[in-house]
Image: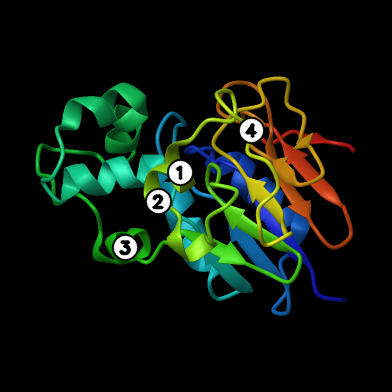
């Protein structure tokens, strides 16, 4: 099997969808799989999602990016941030999945290490990957965390990046369940937790996979 470069959109605790998606993809050792962040919050099994992503490390070349939801959770866990904001954006669902008992040290050590290892962006030959967006005229290694993790395409869609590479992002939910492909930018957050799909896209072949939070496969 030839190498694949596969991006996976926002998972948001949808473990059943993630399992079915990966079963369909069948990751190989020579593949590169990039998850775009927002693994936790809103869906029913954030802990199970992290367990599966940790397992993915042993199956393929796996790149995991930081989303704004992981940033919020880490800020709370590290006692740097008021917990109310995180809880309003789905943190309660994550705490429930970890059987939270009131102690902020609720993360297993392996999970904390996973969250602390998340990358800001990933760059490949003709594509780069970020959770949310980018500033068009700023090199990737100089981008602000706010732009990479928080900027909504509903506010402003950035023009092509100075690198000339195609951006692959999530964060801004396409509530119609469809991939947004603007040529210079592809958004694959297709609203899994809200009734849409969890999407994966092979950037080299164009093949796509979509699964609902209940595990139902959508044929392309």
C-alpha distance separating marks 4 and 2: 16 Å
Spot the residue most to the bottom. 30
Q: Quadrant of the C terminus?
A: top right
Q: Residue 187: x, y in percent?
A: 68, 39
Give the residue displayed 65% in from the left and 60% down from the top. 128
Packing grade of label 3 (10 A; few <14, some 14-19, many >=20) is few
State the residue in front, 201 or 21: 201
Is residue 39 visible to us here? no
- Select label 2 or label 3 by which is in front: 2
User: What residue is shown at x 28% (from left), y 43% (from top)?
Assistant: 73
Q: Earlier in the sequence, mark 3 or mark 1?
A: 3
Q: Marks 4 and 3: in contact by CB < 8 Å?
A: no
Identify the mark at residue 116; answer none if there is no mark: 3
Whether residues under marks 2 and 1 lie with C-beta atoms below 8 angstroms apart, the answer is: yes
Q: Could you give the CA–CA distance between mark 3 and mark 4, rounded to whole angstroms?
A: 29 Å
Q: Which residue, given by chain and number where applicable, does mark 4 sit on?
A: 157
């Amino acid at each position: 099997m030839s190498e694949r470069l596969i991006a996976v959109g926002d998972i948001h605790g949808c473990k059943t969808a993630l399992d079915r998606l990966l079963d369909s993809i069948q990751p190989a050792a020579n593949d590169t799989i990039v998850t775009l962040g927002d693994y936790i919050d809103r869906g029913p099994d954030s802990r199970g999602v992290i367990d599966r992503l940790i397992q993915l490390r042993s199956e393929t070349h796996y790149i995991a990016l930081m989303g704004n939801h992981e940033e919020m959770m880490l800020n709370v866990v590290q006692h740097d941030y008021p917990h109310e904001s995180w809880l309003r954006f789905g943190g309660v669902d994550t705490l429930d999945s970890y059987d939270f008992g009131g102690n902020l040290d609720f993360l297993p050590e392996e999970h904390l290490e996973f969250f602390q290892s998340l990358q800001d962006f990933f760059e490949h030959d003709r594509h780069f990957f970020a959770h949310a967006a980018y500033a068009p005229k700023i090199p990737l290694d100089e981008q602000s965390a706010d732009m990479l993790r928080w900027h909504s395409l509903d506010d402003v869609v950035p023009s092509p990046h100075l690198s000339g590479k195609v951006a692959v992002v999530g964060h801004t939910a396409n509530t119609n369940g469809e991939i947004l492909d603007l040529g210079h930018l592809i958004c694959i957050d297709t609203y899994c937790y809200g009734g849409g799909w969890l999407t994966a896209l092979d950037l080299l072949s164009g093949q796509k996979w979509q699964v609902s939070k209940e595990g139902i496969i959508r044929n392309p």
